[in-house]
Image: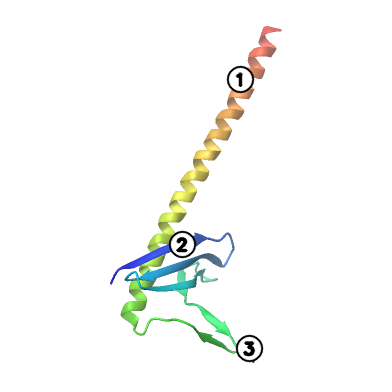
Amino acid sequence: MNIKVNVTLVKNQKVKGSATVVLDDCFKIRDIVILAKNETGELYVAMPYKTLKNGNKISVAYPLNAEFRAELQQHILDEYMALLAKDEAKSNAENEKTSDTVADDESEINNSSEEE
């Protein structure tokens, strides 16, 4: 089965991201949530659900067996980890650029005060 995953990062303590999955280019599942367990921080995937008028929640789409659930979750978490690594690398590059600019500014200030 061809599984395409698109993940969006969420900056939240418990909710880490959301995902959309396309199965075999013919079935799309949105609103899959990537969560972290409170006590361990371990990541897991919650499938989309609908809240009924009486407050009960029912699943909208879900895997029918444990093997496919594990495969789907692995695809989603792999994509999440890749996106997270890319986001952290981008943040580190921006921080280095900012600190280089600050260091250049400080050098210019020191050089101009030495000239006086």
Label placed on residue 7: 2
How dense is the environment of label 3, judged by Cα within 10 Å: few (below 14), some, or many (20 and up)? Answer: few
List the single residue furthest toward the bottom: 54
Q: How is the image coloured?
A: rainbow
**Relative image position of residue 107 (x, y in whole percent):** 61, 20
Query: What residue sits right under mark 3 in the picture?
Result: 55
65 to the left or right of 83: left
Of circles 1 and 3, the one toward us is 3
Secondary structure under badge 3?
Answer: loop
Q: Which residue of the protein is positioned furthest toward the front in this rendering?
A: 26
Mark sitting earlier along the chain (1/3) = 3
Residue 25 lies left or right of residue 15; in this view the side is left
Task: Identify the residue at horizontal 64%, vertical 89% (top origin).
Answer: 53
The disc label shown at residue 80, or none: none
Which of disc 2 and disc 1 is earlier in sequence? 2
Q: What residue type is labelled 1?
A: Ser
**What amino acid type is highlighted by mark number 3?**
Gly
Q: Where 15 sits versus 81, above or below?
A: below
Q: Residue at x 63, y 88 (%)?
A: 55
Q: Element under label 2?
A: strand
Quadrant for the C terminus, please: top right
Q: Where is residue 88 in the image (x, y as percent from the top left)?
A: 49, 49
Q: Label 1: few (<14), some or many (≥20) within 10 Å?
A: few
Going from N to C along the chain, the mark reached first, 2 or 3, is: 2
Up the image or down, 39 lies above or below 78; here it is below
Residue beneath disc 1: 107
Q: Which residue is drawn at 43% across and 62% down?
A: 6
- The Cα atoms of the two marked residues, 1 and 3, are separated by 62 Å
Tell me the quadrant of the picture where the N terminus can be found.
bottom left
Reply above or below: 96 against 104. below
